[in-house]
Amino acid sequence: MSAGILTPKQAAFRDEYRRNIAPWYNGWGHLLSIFVPGIAVIAYCVSEVNEPTLWELLFVIPVLVFYNWNEWWLHKNALHRPIKGILMPVYHRHTHQHHVYFTAQVMTYDTNREWRIVLFPPYALLVFMLLTLPAALVLGYIWSANAGYILMMLTPIYYLNYETFHLCCHVQDNWFVRNMPLVNTIRRHHAAHHSQPIMMERNMNLTYAVADWYMGTSDLDCGLLGHLFNGYSTKHVKKEFASDQGAQLDQRAAA
Ligand SMILES: [Zn+2]
Ligand SMILES: [Zn+2]
């Protein structure tokens, strides 16, 4: 692995941030506080779905496409733009902390105490589930209970997918993240997003770069399949973005 180099500013920020993590903070506790309620809601909704029709199953596709666009929109407009009010701390945490802690040159953490800067606070999933609930209830009323439960389970499914993939973007290079299709693609995609000059406008998806592809905000010049299965390859990276592509990615895997 070619190690990137921490800039003095980044090293100082990391020291300061680590010093300020509460002594009681526990990375696994943080992870479980997101995954346990998420999986519980998924399990409950799955247990309530009863012999779904084809249309109810196909309903999953537009919802996931919409969630993918949502992820793109929130990252672009709430995490990278200062919106006055309750979203301001989210902007500060992402643009001024997460993006200083991790740059395209140094994308990885050393210990799971640093999950503090990678995972969202546990209430984020709660908020997303509360926002989904009225829509799921209305859908259950006007269409079918199955459709309501399917919508309700897709929020934690998508969210846990997001947290897992984003964590995979910041772990040190290993066989799994290098070779797992989709995961390796988002790792390069997100490393390029952490390049300071382009972070406000490029590579806003954190799971599957579908919205980046059709909204024209990707650093790649290729089609949808290329955006899903690019891996670490820099072959299709537009020339203007080629210089800052994730120094810690093992380019031997790109061949
Ligand atoms: Zn990140
Ligand atoms: Zn970002």
Image: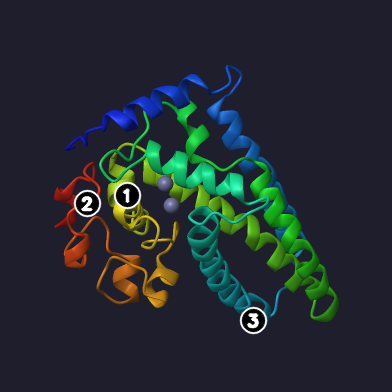
Q: Quadrant of residue 102?
A: top left
Disc 2, ligand 2: is the CB inside 8 Å? no
Q: In the structure shown, which secondary structural element does the residue marked by tag 3 occupy? A: helix
Please state which amino acid type lies under the numbered disc 1.
Gln
Q: CA distance from mark 3 to mark 1?
A: 45 Å
- What amino acid is at disc 2? Asp
Q: Is 86 or 5 nearer to us in this picture?
A: 86
Task: Give x and y (percent) for residue 1.
Answer: 18, 37
Mark 2 vs mark 3: which is more N-terminal?
3
Is the residue under label 1 in contact with that under label 2 (CB below 8 Å)? yes
- Foreground of the two, 61 or 7: 7
For the C terminus, which image quadrant? bottom left
Secondary element under disc 2, as helix, strand or loop, is loop
Give the residue drawn at x 49%, y 64%. Answer: 72
**Quarter residue 243 falls in:** bottom left
- Residue bearing the label numbered 3: 54
| Residue at numbered disc 2 | 244
Q: Residues within 10 Å of mark 2 (few under 14, many from 20)?
A: some
* Residue 39 seen in the figure: no
Q: Quick one: label 1, few (<14), some, or many (20+) residues within 10 Å?
A: some
Q: At which x and y percent is residue 171?
A: 37, 38
Query: Residue type at mark 3?
Result: Leu
Residue 196 numbered mark, or none: 1
Pointers 2 and 3 in contact (CB under 8 A)? no
Disc number lying in front (2 or 1): 1
Q: Residue at the right extreme?
A: 141
Q: Nearer the viewer, residue 247 or 178?
A: 247
